[in-house]
Image: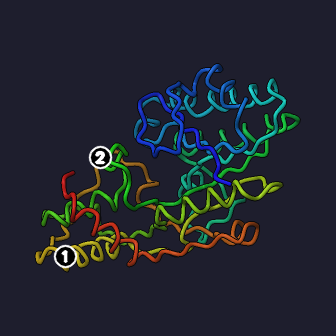
Amino acid sequence: MPADLLLVGRRPISASRRAHVLISDVTTRGCWDLIAARADIVFFVAGNSSVHAAAARPAESEVVALLPLRHLTEAARTSGRPFRVVHASSSRVYGTSTDAPAREEDAAPVTPFGRHCLLAEEFLATESRGSGLEPVSLRVGNVYGPSPGDAPQGKVVLNRIARLAVQGADIPLYGDGNYLRDHVYIDDVVRAFLAAGAHPGVAGAFNVASGASVTMRDAFELVAERAARLTGRRSRICEVAWPSGESPIEIRSFRADVRKFSGTTGWMPRVSLSEGIDRLVQVCGFDPTP
């Protein structure tokens, strides 16, 4: 039997005919009273998504990270209806640790954004006790892949680079590019959220990533190569200096250990980096505008 889907946001949301849309603000209690009255599973992907905004306005970022969850847990207690919450966290909770692969117990954030993500995880876990909620936090790696036209494409590094490569433009690479990233394709992330929602009794924090890592230079070279196959022209990779005052977390190398989530739910990443970039470049080829 198809599930009813309710999409909640402050602005109009693109949706299929099978989805309902609620225009509301998740930082208000009334929004969560409406959600709690009908939800069986809540996929919580709201909050601050900008590392730089969190650093510039840390107090505001903390409020955005925690206030919706406070309203969520309070509304759940009032409603008396148990439901699952799958909360989008970030691999930035691991800070600049050089241990690889990073395990869930290794969290040690060094930026306001990472600290607020971890605070949100801990708050949700603590305040859910006795409320009937079943909270799961997914610490997602570097997500990439096609997104709706109203999504913030510019914040996704590989998406932005793919668009430049399809245009034949130079691709800027900070430093020597020999730092590692764990890129995970959007379809695998969506499957992870569905898997977390579909497993009652599973709770806690879990890594969701590819479990593999490549240097940013190699990732950019792969994008340039696959775009050149499509367009017949290859972009140059140009080293540029890191911006002044850039956080050390941007220069770190990172790879996630995904065995805990895989062992608990059976989820595994399916899309390799080469296949994912092929898909991304094809989409950018149809719409190469930034």
In this rendering, the answer to whether 184 lies above or below 274 is: above
Of residue 79 and residue 181, the one placed in the foreground of this image is 79
- Is 158 displayed left or right of 170 in the figure? right
Instruction: Name the residue rendered at 65%, 39% in the picture.
Output: 120
Q: Position of residue 97 (x, y in %)?
A: 57, 61
**Mark 2: which amino acid?**
Ser
Q: Position of residue 257 (x, y in %)?
A: 63, 70
Q: Earlier in the sequence, mark 1 or mark 2?
A: 1
- Is 211 displayed left or right of 164 in the figure? right
Instruction: Name the residue rendered at 73%, 39% in the picture.
Output: 124
Instruction: Name the residue rendered at 71%, 50% in the picture.
Output: 136
Residue 178 - label: none
In this rendering, the answer to whether 135 lies above or below 189 is: above
Q: Quadrant of residue 234?
A: bottom left
Of residue 37 and residue 65, the one placed in the foreground of this image is 37
Residue where numbered disc 1 is placed: 230
In this rendering, the answer to whether 226 lies above or below 112 is: below
Q: Position of residue 54 (x, y in %)?
A: 47, 36
Q: Residues within 10 Å of mark 1 (few under 14, many from 20)?
A: some
Q: Position of residue 253 (x, y in %)?
A: 47, 66
Helix, strand or loop at disc 1?
A: helix
Tag nearer the camera, 1 or 2: 1
Residue 244 - label: 2
Q: Quadrant of residue 71?
A: top right
Position of the N terminus, as image quadrant, is bottom right
**Mark 1: which amino acid?**
Leu
Helix, strand or loop at disc 2?
A: loop
- Is 19 displayed left or right of 226 in the figure? right
